[in-house]
Amino acid sequence: LMLALLDSLLTAGFDPEDQGRRSVAWRRGGAYTPDGDGSFDIGGTTARALTALGAGTPAVDAGPADDRACGNGSLMRILPIALVGRNWSPDVLIERAQLASRVTHGHPRCQVTCAVYCLIVRELLRGSAPAAALEWAMTTARDAYAADGAIPAASFRAALEELAAYQRRTGSGYVIDAFWSAWDAFAGAADYAQTIVRAIEYGHDTDTTAAIAGGLAGARWGWEGIPVAWRRGMRGHAVAQPLVDRLAGTVTPAEGGPLPTSTENPLRVDLLDLAGTPLEGTGRLGITLLPGKKREGWTGAHWRDLDLDLARLRDLGVDTLFLLNEDAELALCLVPELPDAMAAVGPELVRFPIPDPHVPADPGAYRVAIRGLVERVRGGAFVAIACRGGINRSGMTAACIYRELGLDASEAIARTQAARRRSITIGEEQAFVRAWPW
């Protein structure tokens, strides 16, 4: 349900009718479980809403609004409103959170709780401390509901005061209880993992409580806060990742510009020209950037997915990745798991770490590695060279391979730069190539 909402926001903008259509379509397509078997219990209120939507009820009227319809279903799925709408004004964010809630849960308690949750996430994304984010969200909501506007606000004021005064924390499916249980799990935790464990320990409606708490924890601690094993073990990756990539693509110029992703910008391997060298007619050799990297660097900001990038290398026929990054760089780029991932699925990983942006500390060992790459290509392999941006260390390595094949330094550098624009521009690395062999 959360992904169906995100799909709608990224495709149609804010449009409750489209949200309703996609919610129904995702259910009919078996997409509410990672395995597509349709066995997930979506809850009575949501089921009633989807039935109404399927029968043609307008989306903003589909969510039941009776006192029995105060479950946590809309709160569990509302996070995309806060993520896509991170730059909306508070009033717009409140209005749209409430309208999105009404697609499945129309009771004022559900609408108000969704609005407060989105306000909190907005502030967490801006770096506010949890307590400050909560206080700001409550105050902002009270101000918004202070006077009746186009929609009478009395019921919203009452729901907000009920939310503020609520004391129980049981992890139940009641929307206000679910909010506070998730909040306490988050606010009392030291990191993302502890948040989820604390949410589950309430028992009862553990999946939704953990999802609600996880949204808060993700906004505070970010991608790097999620344990690697949890990310790599997530079911439904193939469904979620393209949507996550599209979300990353909504970054505005004021926020640093759109982020290249593995979905919209598949990993590219630039081939080196081997014509006229002893390797002509054998394998292939190319340059790429660090698979899965998430950070700024020589090639700009990226938000790449490691699994998609590795699959891309395999699809291209790459047999060996010659990686020049140090372990600290892998952590900096949020891919510390790369060696383990490649050991499991390929291509084969060969490492020769070189500090950025320098030359090898042991030229002799480096030449041995270069000769090993030459023999791999001679044997018909496709070898890709990578560093953080696939620019300088990778370019230096490509040029050194050319030198090992007998080309003079100028031609080695020129061929490398012809294959990979802006590569090997650092004087120290060019001098290293010119001094070959070591």
Image (spheres, rainbow, N blue to C red):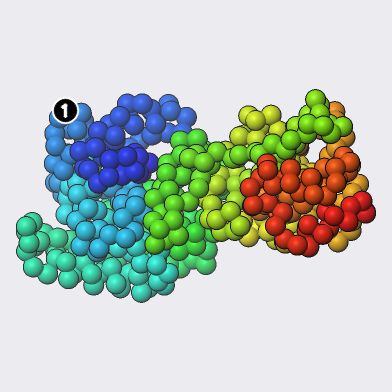
Q: Is residue 149 left or right of residue 91?
A: left
The residue under label 1 is which amino acid type?
Ala
Q: Is residue 189 left or right of residue 358?
A: left
Count of numbered tags? 1
Instruction: Quarter of the image for the C terminus: give it.
Output: bottom right
Instruction: Quarter of the image for the N terminus: give it.
Output: top left
Q: Is residue 48 left or right of residue 277?
A: left
Classify mark 1: helix, strand or loop. loop
Considering only vertical position in the picture, is 245 above or below 332?
above
Percent from the top left, x then y, of residue 261?
Answer: 51, 45
Residue in the image at 68% along x and 43% along y: 418
Residue in the image at 14% along x and 66% along y: 145
Residue that numbered label 1 is attached to: 55
Instruction: Compare residues 283 and 403 and report the one nearer the observer.
Output: 403
Q: Please tell me in which quadrant of the rendered image residue 131 appears.
A: bottom left
Q: Please tell me in which quadrant of the rendered image residue 57 appears.
A: top left
Residue in the image at 32% along x and 39% along y: 11
| Any part of residue 5 in sight | no
Instruction: Compare residues 35 and 312 and report the one nearer the observer.
Output: 312
